[in-house]
Image (tube, rainbow, N blue to C red):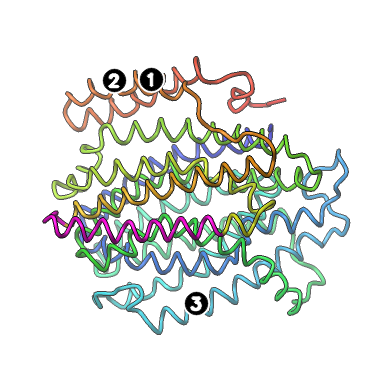
Amino acid sequence: MAALAKGGRTNFFGFLIRLVARIPFLFIASRLYGASALGRFASALVMVEFAGQMATLGQKRGLAQRLAETAWPEAGHRAGHVQDPDAAAHAVADALLVTTLLAGAMSVLIWLFPQSMYPKGNFSQAERLLVLAVWAMAVGDIALAALAFRFDVATTVRARAVVEPWTLSITAGLAYFVYPEGGLALAYLASVGAATAVALVALVRAYGLPRRWRPRPLALLRLAVRNMPLAGADAVEWGTRKIDVFILRFFIGEAPLGIYYFAQQFASLPQKLKTSFEPVLGPVITRNVRAHNMPAIAAQVCQVGFWITAAQAGIALALAIPGAALMGLGGPDFVGGTLALFFLLAAEVVAATAVVSEAALIYVARMRNLWISLGTIVMQGALTVGFILAGNRAGMTSVGESALAALAMALALGTSSLLKSRLLARILGEPINNWRWALIWAAVPAIAVGAVAHLLPEWAELVLGLPAILGVYCLVIWRVGFGPEDRVLFRKDPV
């Protein structure tokens, strides 16, 4: 629990840094490049990020189990202390090799079929170069997962919350004056490359170079087969956050898609806070799985689940109440995406239970977890298409149809949370529940503060109202909702 608390603390501050860093990029991209360019960028990223996700082959979480098998099981040894001093480095090298081979193959396929990124056929040569981000993204994820096994979350914060977003913002601003046709693509390449460089430097320092390592084709093949359920679960979990954009790009124009992507970037901030617990939660759960300590797993899942739910609910309120002012940062045309922002934020809150439940299910019920995940994404896809077609028949605007896609996501992820928590509770023989009434007690005064802030000018609503909403919520949840076991999250040296 101390390790989880330390990781959670680090990632909370990383979230705040990420929030501050994300706004300049969105402002630059929307005001300088425009909604259409942002829509093309979003369309391409769906394929690039999907390829990067598949290239990891589930190893972002599976690597924790692989490294745990090389570690001494006896108590008293630090995580990562190994029998063979090179075993951990060899495991990481194997993972990086598999990822590199897959990333290369997928990059070639996307390069040969650029319409997979740009269905409208409207792209520049620089925008086509986005395929180069596949390898950097996948390798960076593997490196950060390996570091998380040693409870090094600070590198993740540096790479993903500082280096990546600030490089993206600065490069996008400079590139507009040099090569505006492909500035967003070039900025993304620079940001992903810089973040991966930070991760790889830290990886070498932590594990060293793989001395006397030789690639093992048969072992790599077994690793690939073994990780298929994890790869599928990871891909589906990622897909639930991206299938909306994938479908929308066939139904609406580039500009409405850019507005939706703008809203999605704010809504994805709570998701980053949530998923950043996974690398820390994974190693802790694997140790308890090996010890068959099911009550401890249930306690950790519920504890982290409440931390995530409480944090996400407060962040969602702080972003949703001044939502129109937030969307207005992109310009008057972007305000129409406020409803989509509401539904996207709600989706992240209801998804918290599924994410923490899955962190345990991938070790105790891989295939059943995968089937639920597959059912979730099929449900979301069907609802998204159905809602869009219904909205079209009702004469809704393209921006309105995009809000229905966000609603479909919220319904699908809520269903997933219910099913996965029930399954985990049955396997562990312990209740799994992230809900506490304190969430409501904290939300009521926060909404009241938000209603007052809504009377202020837009700039004041954001500068003063947003932190006031979050501050009141945090104060109440601390006083009413957090017990002694929760407050370990905020102690520097939890016991």
- What element does badge 2 sit on? helix
Label 2 sits on what residue type? Answer: Val
Residue drawn 51% across the image and 36% down it: 308
Question: Marks 2 and 3, how far apart in space?
Answer: 49 Å
Q: Secondary structure at mark 1?
A: helix
Question: Is there a contact, CB below 8 Å, between mark 2 and mark 1?
Answer: yes
Q: Around disc 1, counting alpha carbons within 10 Å, would you say few (fewer than 14), some (14 to 19), or many (20 or more)?
A: many
How dense is the environment of label 2, judged by Cα within 10 Å: few (below 14), some, or many (20 and up)?
A: many
The residue wearing badge 3 is: 106
Determine whether 225 is above or below 400 in the image: below
Q: Position of residue 316 (x, y in %)?
A: 37, 35
- Residue 430 spot, x, y in % from top left: 67, 35
**Between 194 and 285, which is closer to the camera in this rendering?**
285
Q: Is residue 298 left or right of residue 464?
A: right
Q: Earlier in the sequence, mark 3 or mark 1?
A: 3
- Find residue 377 and report its horizontal and vertical position in percent: 44, 58
Of the numbered discs in the image, which one, if any, rests on residue 449?
2
The image quadrant of residue 426 is top right
Q: Is residue 3 magenta?
A: no
Quadrant of image for the N terminus: top right
Between marks 3 and 1, how big is the CA–CA gap?
47 Å
User: Considering the numbered disc 3 on the image, is that residue within a helix, a strand or a loop?
Assistant: helix
Residue displayed at 44% across by 23% down = 474
- Disc 2 to disc 1, how far (Cα)? 8 Å
Residue for badge 1: 472
The region drawn magenta spans: 371-397
Residue 456 image point, x, y percent: 18, 25
